[in-house]
Amino acid sequence: MNAVGALLAPALTPGQEISLWFGGAIILVAATAWLMKLLERARRQRVEMEADAVRRAAQTEAAKIVAEGEARAKSEFLKLRESFDKDTQSTRREMRDEEKRLAKREDLVDQKMETAGAKERTLEAAEKAVAERERALIAKDKQLNDLIARQKSQLLKVANLSLEEARAQVLSQTEKDVANDVAEVVSKRLDEARETAEAQAREVIVTAIQRYAAEHTAAATVSTVDIPSDDMKGRVIGREGRNIRAFEKATGVDVVVDDTPGVVVVSGFDPVRREVARRSLEKLIQDGRIHPTRIEEVVAATEKEVSKQVLAAGRQAVVDANIRGLHNKLVELLGRLQFRTSYGQNVLQHSMEVAYLGQVIADELGLKGMVARRAGLLHDIGKAIDHEVEGGHPAIGADLCKRYGERDEIINAVAGHHNDVEAVSIYTPIIAAADAISAARPGARRETLERYVQRLQKLEEIAGGFEGVRQAYAIQAGREVRVLVDAENVDDKLSSKIARDIAKRVEDEMEYPGEVRVTVIRELRCVEYAR
């Protein structure tokens, strides 16, 4: 080949040789480029194939996740739907039961009021009869005076008695005669009153129940929170008491941690603050993280929660009572009454009852029922802030109603429902009577054992203090007192007088819910023996 090149070499010129080398280089570059293009195409195809595989795998996985999510969501939806249906059915049953109970109560009240209205028309005739009886008693009293004078003169003439002895004998005989006459008159009047009792029921209810409308109330000022262990008590107190001090500062209540197992006591006169403190402490115990910063966060969140609940409760009460145009501040104060109790009776529920009863009484008397309902709902509004403002809750409530534009009838009813001010409106005694009915109904309020025993002892003491009474027993939780009299010294007429005198003295000297029945029993037993 070298020989051939040597042979051909002389034949190539330098320019041709350069052209030959240049052409070879071009061919080499072109071949290299073509080879690189083939490699790049092969690499691109491989990458596209891998990308397609990843895309298909991702699509498959996404479809699987979507299917699982849809199945899980459908299952959760079915569970929630089932729970909602159960809750709805339970609520509907409770609402139907409540509607039946209210309808039954309304029917009973309507029936009683219709009966009372039917017999009220005989009241005027009964009053005329009483007036005639009084005139007859005056005439009889004059006759008795004349008789006493004649007997005195005859005794001085016939008997060898001094003036003082004659006077004593005449007075003794006169007292017996007058006592018998009075007992007879009282017995006749009671018989007449029983015949016309239902006719006078409306007036009797408004006046008699009003006697008990001035009872004082006491609210609970402590709440208890369950503690799972003594270790948790230590965490509530904190190092050197820093946690409990931070909690009391944030809530404004006192926290009592003593040796009582499983209980921490929250004490405070503000029922809303006490409720905030109770809920906050329960949340902290459940969370387990108890330190000053966490305490402030939980208390702030709980205050917002309770404030919303207070406002919602006030608005619901206004809607239930069908009251319109009430100031927002009064609505909020009504909601605060949800956390206030009196002898264990919820004050907001008590206010709703007074509103309803006040409207019923006002409607039956031909007055404006909505005014009475409004006054009944607001009558205890002062209890919402009586721990913050000096004075009794009637005066505080009246000031609030006046400040927020309530009518004069409402203000007087709120201020005078405990007889603290003079009643200048007919709605004031109506609200006082409705307040007493709600407070005195069975089961409405709790009574301490000590006061209960004292009331029974006082009843027996009053009944046993009358002449001719042998024994007296207070029964039926103090709602009745049975009196046994001496049958030899007390006749039927005097028994009736004793029963009336005992009842009057109980009314004058005692405070009690509802009414007390006085039953006088006169029994004569004759025993003989056959031998």
Image (tube, rainbow, N blue to C red):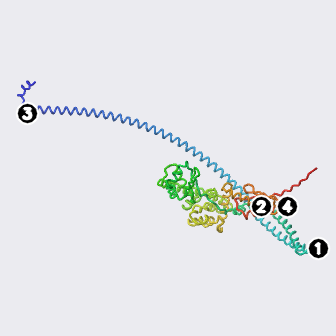
Label placed on residue 2: none
Q: Earlier in the sequence, mark 4 or mark 1?
A: 1
Q: Residues within 10 Å of mark 1 (few under 14, many from 20)?
A: few
Q: CA distance from mark 4 to mark 1?
A: 32 Å
Q: Earlier in the sequence, mark 2 or mark 3?
A: 3
> Which is more foreground, mark 4 or mark 2?
2
Describe the element under mark 2 as helix, strand or loop. Answer: helix
Residue denoted by label 3: 15
| Proximity of marks 4 and 2: CB atoms separated by less than 8 Å | no
| Proximity of marks 3 and 4: CB atoms separated by less than 8 Å | no
Describe the element under mark 1 as helix, strand or loop. Answer: helix
Q: Decide if residue 31 is on the left or right side of residue 528.
A: left
Q: CA distance from mark 2 to mark 1?
A: 43 Å
Residue denoted by label 1: 158
How far across and how far down the image is residue 494, in percent? 83, 62
Describe the element under mark 3 as helix, strand or loop. Answer: helix
Q: Residue at x 26, y 34 (%)?
A: 40
Q: Residue at x 17, y 32 (%)?
A: 28
Q: CA distance from mark 3 to mark 1?
A: 196 Å
> Which is more foreground, mark 3 or mark 1?
1
Residue denoted by label 2: 463
Instruction: Please name the amino acid that badge 2 sits on.
Output: Ala
Residue denoted by label 4: 491
Q: Earlier in the sequence, mark 4 or mark 2?
A: 2
Taking depth in this image into account, of 469 and 520 the one nearest to the observer is 469
